[in-house]
Image (cartoon, rainbow, N blue to C red):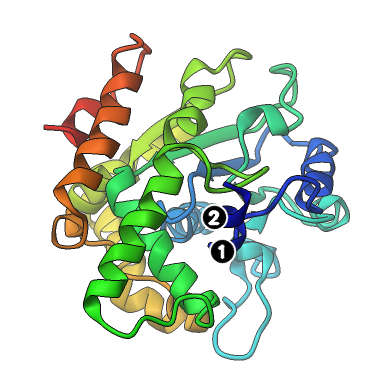
Amino acid sequence: SSGINAEYGGHPKGHKGNLRRRDVKQVQFRPDDILVASFPRSGTTWTIEILRQLHIRHIADRNHPLWQPLSGADKPKQANEGIFLAGKVTEKMENTESPRLLKTHDYLKDMNMITTENNCKIILVVRDPKDLYCSIFEQCKRRKPDRFTMEHEEEEFRKLQEFIATFHTGKRYSPGPSNWASYIQEYLENPHNIDIFYMKYEDLKTKTAQIIAQLNTFIGYPAMSPEEIEEIVRLTSYDVMKTTHGPVMNAKTKGVQGSYKNRLSSASIAAINENIAKFINTGIDDKGLNLKAYIE
């Protein structure tokens, strides 16, 4: 499996990613931090921008990091796009004014979440693994074109099925998130009773206004009018974010729900659904996410 990991950009054991995990454990969270946790390609950038829009309505100081211009075409990523918990982030986090928006693809156990004292709030974003695996494949094609040069559609189809198999068997990333079920399991079990908002990417797509209102309540802000909510829906739409976020959106797609149906073989779909079913059948409380919908 190490050969497969290397081919698709995974990290073999002993990779410097292990150092990254130790760095993340040093992170000191604040009570007003909001941390968006998700398996890769699950709507993190979109969620962070919604949270930013909710925050700045209550921040009068226009010099606050969340008010600063977004990265656009020629600016580096800013704290207003969410501080990604990777590498040596401690100094950057300490120097960022509250409230801070944070994001991670790390397992819960890999972070300094031992007690509920001074803990931040977490938003877990869950997406149908069949769609997100296809999205990760597209990301790998962009990032590693030399490894993903495919002569014809049949070759791409074959490579995608092989790529998918490495994920749902838990072989994709080492030491990063590899298996969708094991990743969300830690957040669902929530052994330290952290304040977590559980959200499906598909619900954010189809019930955007409703989810925004729920996120606003979760943060602790007063209720908004329908007009205020609709304005945030507009400001965080894909078309608007393509303008405000510049190149960061060039690697994003509209995340069409169910697009995997045109890309995955029936065997690949069945294998992933079997994995989801096994996870559900463990009896784990899915916190109202209705994970069964992913296999119906």
* The one of 276 and 86 positioned closer to us in this rendering: 276
The answer to whether 214 appears left or right of 58 in the picture is left
Graded by Cα atoms within 10 Å as few (under 14), some (14 to 19) or many (20 or more), the crowding at tag 2 reads: some
Total number of numbered discs in the rendering: 2
Dot 1 falls on a residue whose secondary structure is helix
Name the quadrant of the C terminus: top left
Q: Which mark is residue 46?
A: none
Which residue is found at the position 38% from the left and 47% from the top? 165
Residue 13: x and y in percent read 74, 45
Dot 2 falls on a residue whose secondary structure is helix
Image: 269 above or below 181: below
Which residue is found at the position 25% from the left and 29% from the top? 274
Q: CA distance from mark 2 to mark 1?
A: 5 Å
Residue 199: x and y in percent read 36, 37
Image: 154 above or below 95: below
Q: Amino acid at mark 1?
A: Glu
Which residue is found at the position 63% from the left and 14% from the top? 192
Residue on which the image places disc 1: 7
**Residues tagged 2 and 1 counted as in contact (Cβ below 8 A):** yes
Q: Amino acid at mark 2?
A: Ile
* The one of 270 and 53 positioned closer to us in this rendering: 270
Q: Which mark is residue 4?
A: 2
